[in-house]
Image (spheres, rainbow, N blue to C red):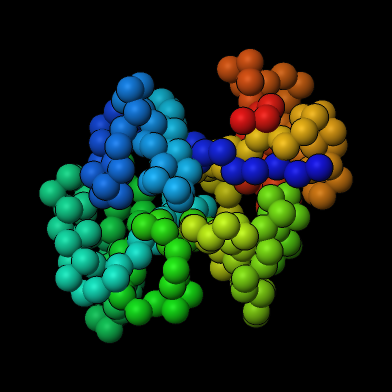
Amino acid sequence: MSSHLVSLSFDAKDPVNLARFWAGVLRREVAADGTTILPAEGTGFPIRFLSSTAEKTGPNQMHFDLTSQSPEEQDATVARALELGGRHLDIGQGPDETHVVMADPEGNELCVIAAGNNFLAGTAAIGALSSDGTQAVGYFWSKALGWPLVWDQDEETAIQSPAGGSKISWGGPPVNPKTGKNRLRLDLAADGDRDAELDRLISLGAKRLDNGSQDGEWIELVDPDGNEFNLSERG
């Protein structure tokens, strides 16, 4: 039994506007519902923007690291983000930093990584879902998704699908205290019987949050670090 990643849920006060921003930055198309970004051809995953009134209370547990193939492409991505409503973000980075730290129109962090980054070589436009988390949670997600570890050093971990594409990475300790529900969450679908897969994920260290399902389809769980994620039937 296993699960596969079917989408990424992204809470937003204005889902339509945020979907337009990220579609423009990533050069992807928006689905007919106006709130879902379609995956790039052959790679990636849909991003579902969901309406939420919750205030952002701290740095997101997960943010996008966007790749660049040249200095000109990095500059173009930054310019496109600014034009679409993003802004530069000061998190104390020094003047010698080669990546550009930004925020989208709702304050969600992102990094535009300089060309030549070996860790992100051969990935997608979203090179990594860069996450705050422990080594143990990296091991959990490797087993949950069946993605091998592609980095495991000094309590930092990263996994990647055998098919390639975006990596998911965790920075290791210290892990920021959780201040509310994560704005970005992974959506999984069971590859077989969902009840059996639910039991498997719980045996790996996940916990179910309620006795029902969200929207009649999704079961909400948390991983060993307390990060929410969703499980649905085969998708």
- 151 is higher (above) or lower (below) than 167: below
Outermost residue to the bottom? 96
Residue 184 coordinates in the image, percent (x, y): 49, 43
| Pick the front one: 50 or 165 | 165
- 91 is higher (above) or lower (below) than 1: below
Q: Is residue 164 left or right of residue 217?
A: left
Q: Residue at x 44, y 54 (%)?
A: 63
Quadrant where the N terminus sits is top right
Q: Residue at x 84, y 33 (%)?
A: 196
User: Can residue 119 be spotted in the picture?
Assistant: yes
- Residue 29: which quarter of the image? top left
- 176 is higher (above) or lower (below) than 93: above
Q: Residue at x 27, y 47 (%)?
A: 27
Q: Residue at x 35, y 65 (%)?
A: 67
Residue 90 coordinates in the image, percent (x, y): 28, 65
Residue 114 coordinates in the image, percent (x, y): 30, 74
User: Can residue 91 be spotted in the picture?
Assistant: no
Quadrant where the C terminus sits is top right
- 45 is higher (above) or lower (below) than 69: above
| Pick the front one: 26 or 65 | 26
Q: Is residue 143 left or right of residue 74?
A: right
